[in-house]
Amino acid sequence: MRMTSIGRLLAVVLLACAAGAPAQKPADGAAPLRILHVMSYHSPWRWTDGQLEGFKAGLADPRAQYKVFALDTKRYSSTEAMAARGREARALVESWKPDLVYTTDDDAQELVTRHYLDTPIPQVFSGVNKSPAHYGFDKAKNVTGVIEHEHFGESVHLLKKLVPGLKRLVVVLDEAPMWGPVVQRMKESPLPPGVAIVGWETLRTFDEFKARMGAYPDIADAVALIGIFSFKDKAGRNVPYQEVLRWTAENSRLPDLGFWIDRVHYGTLAAVTVSEREQGLAAGRLARQILVEGKSPASLPIRATTKGVPVISLARAKRL
């Protein structure tokens, strides 16, 4: 049968795709790879689940066996509770003996990864805000991963397009230590001309948050809701961030922004989001280079993903 020009082009594309596809692990009867995933937070949650889905796509080994341990540090947030959860996760590492440990977000680095520096078990991370040097990753032979860098300047530019009169922005944070390096990067991000941050406010309780949100219209044109996970209720428990965002959407008349797509889902107006899938995908590709291609973790540079996705809540826009 005569091949048309379109057919020839398709054949070339298919051949190119086949040539560029990663080599599959030989089906030599070896035991499937064992991957232990230790997440800092919990599931179901788009951020954590999306990283794992991306990791699986990057590793591209359908035979791999996964075991997941959720540290759940948004709920177990006291020093004692987090330490206990960390011991449970490390006990699982010792008993299951995975081929690789994949950790996500900062709490897992503190409670798990740093305890295995320069051991035979490869460690790959994603979603980490602090510097690799903070955990000793820059000098470890068995660790590599993916840094999470927020798109703050881009998010403010997006909000400025929605709110042309935006000049004054307040940043809201909770007391979690993870926000230190995030704030530093935010301060270094270029903002649209004429826009200034008029307040960096660290709040402790949900009641305090409600009171301050009521006062912000007098001093600001918009709010950046960054740290909203550990506001305490009257009983001293953490208020779920979904509840914080729902209350804000129902009661605040100020436009707001965040960094993650689930924030927009629960009512935040706009964000140029960090892609959880890109974080996990990059980590999975690193794991593949280690487990399938035989590369050492130390030979694989630690980098940040750069892809961001602009997202707007049309429902919130209508309410505002």
Image (cartoon, helix red, strand yellow):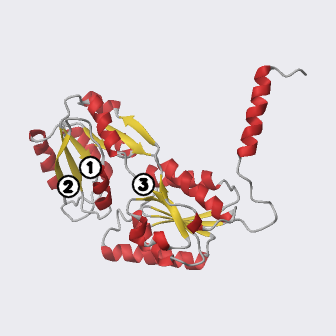
> Which mark is drawn over residue 152?
none
Q: Quadrant of the N terminus?
A: top right
Query: Residue 310: x, y in percent?
Result: 40, 36
Q: Could you tell me if the residues under marks 1 and 2 are in contact, i.e. CB atoms within 8 Å?
A: yes
Which badge, 2 or 3, is on the more N-terminal residue?
A: 3
Give residue 244's mark: 1
Q: Residue furthest right?
A: 1
> Where is mark 3, residue-wise?
148
- Is the residue marked by circle 2 packed among few (<14), some (14-19), or many (20+) residues within 10 Å? some
Quadrant location of the C terminus in the rendered image:
top left
Q: Is residue 24 visible?
A: yes
Mark 1 and mark 2: Cα distance apart in space: 8 Å
Residue sitting at x 32%, y 34%: 158
Badge 3 vs badge 1, beta-carbon distance below 8 Å: no
SS category of the residue bearing label 3: loop
> Is disc 2 placed on a helix, strand or loop?
helix
Q: Are marks 2 and 3 in contact (CB under 8 Å)?
A: no
Residue that label 2 marks: 206
Mark 2 belongs to which amino acid? Phe
**Residue 319 drawn at (x, y percent):** 25, 30
Residue in the image at 30% along x and 47% along y: 189
Which of the 4 quarters of the picture holds residue 238? Answer: bottom left
Position of residue 52 in the picture relative to residue 295 (left or right): left
Residue 45: tell me if it is visible: no
Tell me which numbered mark, 3 or 1, is placed earlier along the sequence.
3
Disc nearest the viewer among 2 and 3: 3
